[in-house]
C-alpha cells in the first residue's frame, strides 16, 4: 500500500532546499541514486478514453475543425482522478449510442473534407471494389486510431466491411465511411488496451506499442504522434537509453504543456469551474465568466512555473506572480494588466493573497453557493495536496451549521460546535484548523476582514505548525513534509490508472525521495515517472 496515503511520512529532511533557487536548464544528477526497489507492478488495466482524450485524438489525427457531439459518456472520478475512474468504468448502453453517433458523424466529415480525404485515402474512389485502396486507408488510419498496427484478421475484416458497404451503397467513399466508423467504434479505439506480455506479464513489461500509448496519454493526454509510433516500430521504447531520449523529446514538445494542464486540471478539479454557480444576490461579482477565468489563471500560473521558470513545486503555494483578466482583477482588487485577455501581475505583499490557494479556482470552488466552507477547503488541502485519509462521517452525524446569531457571527464561532461534538470532532479536527486560514476570503474569493460586522480570526494550525492567516498558511503547506510525496503518488496514479492501495509504497517513497533531491522540480518528476519500472510494467529497475 502507498505509504503516503497511510501517512507514513518521509523524513522532513527530504524537503530540505524546497525553496532554493537552481539553474532551470540543468537536470539534477541521479548518478548516486539507488536502484528502484524490487516490487510487483499493479495488475494491467484496460482504460476507457476520457472525453478530453477522445476529443484530443480526433483533433490530432484529423482536424480541430471536425465537429464533435456536445457530450459523450460521462467520466467518473475515483480518488479524485478521472484517470483512475477510466481504469474501472465501462461504457453504458447510453454511451454506446453516443459513441456510435459520433463515429459515423466523424467519418462522414473526414470523407467530405477534401484535404482530409486526400491525406488518408490513396485513390480517387472511382472503383467501388478497390480492395487495395480500402485496405491501405484502413491500415494507415488504424495505426493512428488504435495506436498499434492492425493484424491480418483485423485488417481483412474491416476492409470487407468497407467494400460490402460500398457495394451496397454504390459508392466507394460511402463504404469507406463505414470502415472508418468501425475503427472509431472499436474497443481498440475507445479503450487503451495495455496488457503487457500476455504470456508472462507483468514480469516482461509492456511492449513497445503499449509503452508508446502509455507515454502519450501520460505526458500529452492524446494519441502517439508519428515519431512515437515509429520509435515503437523500431523497438526503441523497450530499450532504456532510447526510451530516455524519447521521453526528453516529448517533454520538450509543446504538447507536454497540454498534458500537464490536463493532469493538474484533474488533480485540482479545475474542470468543475466551468459550471461554477453562486447566489448572485450574495456575490455581486459573480458572472458566467468567473469560473472559466479562474481556471485559466491557475493553469497559466502552473504552466509558467513549470515550463518557463522550472521552479520548485512548493513555490506554487507562496508565489505572488499570477495572470488575471478584468474579471479577476476586479475580484482581487488589483489593476487590470490588459484591457482584453490575461496579463501578468504581482500581487501586493500586504494584500493577504498569494499562491494557488489565494486564487478563485480554490476559494470559490470549495465553498457553498452563498457562504464559505471551512470544511470543504480543509478537505481539499488534506486530501488533494497532502494525501491524508479522512474518515467517513458517522451515519448519524449532524452536518448542519448553526445560524448566525449575536454570539456566533463568524464562521469560526459557528463551526465550533463540530469541534466540540465527539461524533464530528474526529474529522473536523483534521480539516477545519487549516480551512479556517482562508476565512478572509468570501465564498467567491474576495478579500474581507469582517463577517457580519465581526472581525475575522483566520489563525489555525496544520500538524502542529501554526499560522495567523492564509498568507502564512501557504508557507506552512509549502514546507509540509507530505506535499512532495503526495504529488509523487498522484502522478503515479494518473500515469497508471491505479488506486492508491494498488501502488507499491516502497516505490512511491523511492520516487518521492528522488523528487526531493531534484529540488521538487515537476518536469523532473514527470520524467522519473515516465521511466519508472512500474509505469513500464517491470518488477525492477534496469
Image (tube, rainbow, N blue to C red):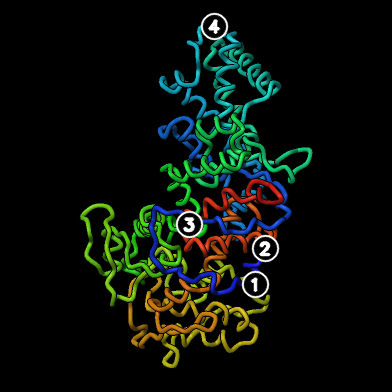
Mark 3 or mark 1, which has the lower sequence index?
A: 1
Number of callouts: 4
CA gap, disc 3 and disc 1? 26 Å
> As drawn, is 302 to the left or to the right of 525?
left
**10 Å neighbourhood of mark 1: few (<14), some, or many (≥20)?**
few
- The image position of residue 335, as x and y in percent, is 22, 65
Residue that badge 4 annotates: 127
Which residue lies at the image location 47% right of the left edge and 51% below the top edge?
260
Point out the residue furthest to the right here: 199
**Cα–Cα gap, marks 2 and 3:** 24 Å
- Identify whether 396 is placed above or below 73: below
Q: Earlier in the sequence, mark 4 or mark 3?
A: 3
Contact (Cβ within 8 Å) of mark 1 with mark 2: yes
Where is residue 292 drawn, in percent x and y?
38, 55
| Front of the two marks 4 and 1 | 1
Can I make out residue 56 in this image?
A: yes
The residue that disc 3 covers is 28
Q: Of tags 4 and 3, which is closer to the observer? A: 3
Pointer 2: what residue?
505
Q: CA distance from mark 1 to mark 2?
A: 9 Å
Regarding mark 4 in the picture, which secondary structure is present there? loop
Q: Element at badge 1?
A: loop
Amino acid at each position: 500500500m502507498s505509504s503516503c496515503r497511510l501517512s507514513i511520512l518521509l523524513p522532513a529532511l527530504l524537503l530540505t532546499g524546497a525553496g532554493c533557487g537552481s539553474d532551470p536548464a540543468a537536470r539534477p544528477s541521479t548518478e548516486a541514486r539507488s536502484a528502484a526497489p524490487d516490487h510487483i507492478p499493479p495488475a494491467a488495466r484496460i482504460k476507457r478514453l476520457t472525453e478530453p482524450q477522445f476529443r484530443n485524438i480526433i483533433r490530432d489525427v484529423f482536424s480541430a475543425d471536425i465537429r464533435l457531439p456536445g457530450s459523450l459518456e460521462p467520466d467518473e472520478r475515483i480518488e479524485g482522478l478521472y484517470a483512475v475512474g477510466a481504469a474501472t468504468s465501462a461504457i453504458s448502453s447510453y454511451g454506446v449510442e453516443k459513441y456510435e453517433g459520433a463515429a459515423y458523424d466523424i467519418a462522414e466529415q473526414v470523407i467530405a473534407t477534401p484535404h482530409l480525404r486526400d491525406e488518408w485515402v490513396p485513390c480517387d474512389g472511382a472503383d467501388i471494389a478497390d480492395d487495395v485502396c480500402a485496405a491501405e486507408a484502413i491500415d494507415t488510419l488504424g495505426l493512428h486510431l488504435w495506436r498499434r498496427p492492425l493484424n491480418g484478421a483485423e485488417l481483412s475484416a474491416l476492409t470487407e466491411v468497407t467494400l460490402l458497404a460500398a457495394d451496397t451503397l454504390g459508392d466507394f467513399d460511402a463504404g469507406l465511411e463505414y470502415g472508418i466508423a468501425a475503427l472509431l467504434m472499436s474497443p481498440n479505439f475507445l479503450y487503451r488496451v495495455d496488457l503487457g506480455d500476455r504470456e508472462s506479464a507483468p514480469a516482461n513489461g509492456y511492449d513497445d506499442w503499449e509503452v508508446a500509448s502509455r507515454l502519450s496519454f501520460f505526458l500529452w493526454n492524446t494519441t502517439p504522434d508519428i515519431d512515437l509510433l515509429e520509435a515503437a516500430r523500431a523497438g526503441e521504447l523497450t530499450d532504456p537509453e532510447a526510451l530516455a531520449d524519447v521521453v526528453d523529446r516529448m517533454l520538450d514538445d509543446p504538447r507536454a504543456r497540454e498534458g500537464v494542464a490536463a493532469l493538474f486540471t484533474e488533480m485540482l478539479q479545475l474542470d468543475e469551474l466551468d459550471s461554477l454557480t453562486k447566489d448572485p444576490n450574495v456575490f455581486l461579482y459573480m458572472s458566467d465568466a468567473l469560473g472559466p477565468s479562474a481556471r485559466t489563471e491557475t493553469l497559466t500560473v502552473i504552466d509558467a512555473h513549470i515550463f518557463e521558470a522550472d521552479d520548485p513545486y512548493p513555490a506554487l503555494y507562496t508565489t505572488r506572480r499570477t495572470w488575471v483578466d478584468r474579471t479577476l482583477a476586479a475580484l482581487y482588487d488589483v489593476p487590470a494588466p490588459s484591457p482584453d485577455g490575461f496579463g501578468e501581475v504581482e500581487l501586493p505583499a500586504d494584500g493577504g493573497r498569494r499562491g494557488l490557494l489565494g486564487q478563485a479556482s480554490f476559494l470559490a470552488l470549495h465553498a457553498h453557493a452563498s457562504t464559505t466552507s471551512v470544511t470543504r477547503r480543509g478537505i481539499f488541502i488534506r486530501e488533494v495536496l497532502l494525501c491524508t485519509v479522512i474518515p467517513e462521517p458517522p451515519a448519524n452525524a449532524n452536518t448542519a451549521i448553526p445560524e448566525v446569531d449575536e454570539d456566533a457571527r463568524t464562521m469560526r464561532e459557528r463551526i465550533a460546535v463540530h469541534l466540540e461534538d465527539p461524533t464530528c470532532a474526529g474529522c473536523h479536527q483534521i480539516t477545519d484548523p487549516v480551512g479556517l486560514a482562508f476565512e478572509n476570503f468570501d465564498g467567491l474569493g474576495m478579500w474581507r476582514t469582517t463577517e457580519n460586522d465581526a472581525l475575522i480570526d483566520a489563525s489555525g494550525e496544520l500538524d502542529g505548525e501554526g499560522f495567523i492567516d492564509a498568507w502564512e498558511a501557504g508557507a506552512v503547506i509549502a514546507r509540509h513534509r507530505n506535499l512532495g510525496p503526495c504529488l509523487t503518488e498522484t502522478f503515479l496514479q494518473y500515469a497508471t490508472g491505479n488506486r492508491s492501495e494498488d501502488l507499491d509504497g516502497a516505490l512511491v517513497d523511492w520516487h518521492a525521495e528522488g523528487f526531493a533531491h531534484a529540488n521538487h522540480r515537476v518536469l523532473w518528476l514527470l520524467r522519473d515517472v515516465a521511466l519508472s519500472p512500474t509505469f513500464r510494467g517491470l518488477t525492477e529497475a534496469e
